[in-house]
Image (cartoon, rainbow, N blue to C red):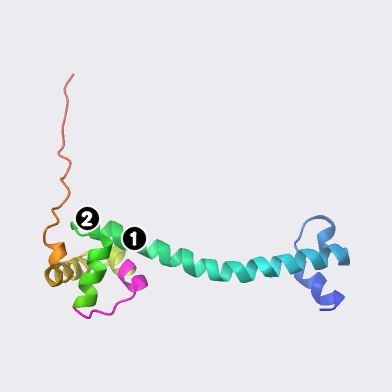
Amino acid sequence: MNKKEILKLAKGFRGRAKNCIRIARERVEKALQYSYRDRRNKKRDMRSLWVQRINAATRQHGVNYGNFMHGLMVENIQLNRKVLSELSMHEPYSFKTLVDISRNAFHGNKNVVLPPRKADVSINV
């Protein structure tokens, strides 16, 4: 890259990294390395977030994430984790039907008991 391109990419950097070509070249190179790495890490982080959301939603219905996904696989329901995560947040009734389908498809889901609900306990002092 020539000097003009490097200084254009270094716009907004702090100190001499924005106008001294030698320092700017090093900082721009490192910034491009970080952006390359983090474009891949972003995909990893989003998938992890989707799995956490699905797991939280399935546990409300008494099924864990692994058994839920296995039940969907057995029933040949091909929804990806992004869509399942969105369903769990925005369409809870539709997600509950998927949990029920998964529970009926995989015998490991039937033995799971729902977590006990916390009763409202009022203490008068």
Q: Position of residue 22 (x, y in %)?
A: 87, 65
Q: Secondary structure at mark 2?
A: helix
Instruction: Please report the bounds of the magenta region as a residue range.
Output: 75-85
Residue located beneath label 1 in the image: 53
> For residue 61: magenta?
no
Q: Position of residue 66 (x, y in %)?
A: 27, 64
State the residue lying farthest toward the top: 125
Q: Position of residue 54 (x, y in %)?
A: 30, 63
Q: Position of residue 96 (x, y in %)?
A: 18, 65
Q: Secondary structure at mark 1?
A: helix
Indicate the amino acid at tag 2: Gln
Which quarter of the picture shows residue 72? bottom left
- Rendered residue at 34%/71% (across/down): 81
Q: Is residue 41 left or right of residue 119?
A: right
**119, above or below 63, in the image:** above
Q: Is residue 16 left or right of residue 110?
A: right
Q: Residues within 10 Å of mark 2 (few under 14, many from 20)?
A: few
- Rendered residue at 78%/56% (across/down): 14
Which quarter of the picture shows residue 34? bottom right
What numbered label is drawn on residue 107? none
Nearer to me, 41 or 118: 41
Q: Is residue 54 left or right of residue 42?
A: left
Nearer to me, 39 or 20: 39
Marks 2 and 1 close (CB-CB < 8 Å): no
- Rendered residue at 20%/77% (across/down): 74
Indicate the amino acid at tag 1: Arg
Quarter of the rendering occupied by the N terminus: bottom right
**10, above or below 15, in the image:** below
Residue located beneath label 2 in the image: 60
- Answer with mark 2 or mark 1, whichever residue precedes in sequence: 1
- Rendered residue at 85%/78% (across/down): 2
Marks 2 and 1 sit apart, C-alpha to C-alpha, by: 11 Å
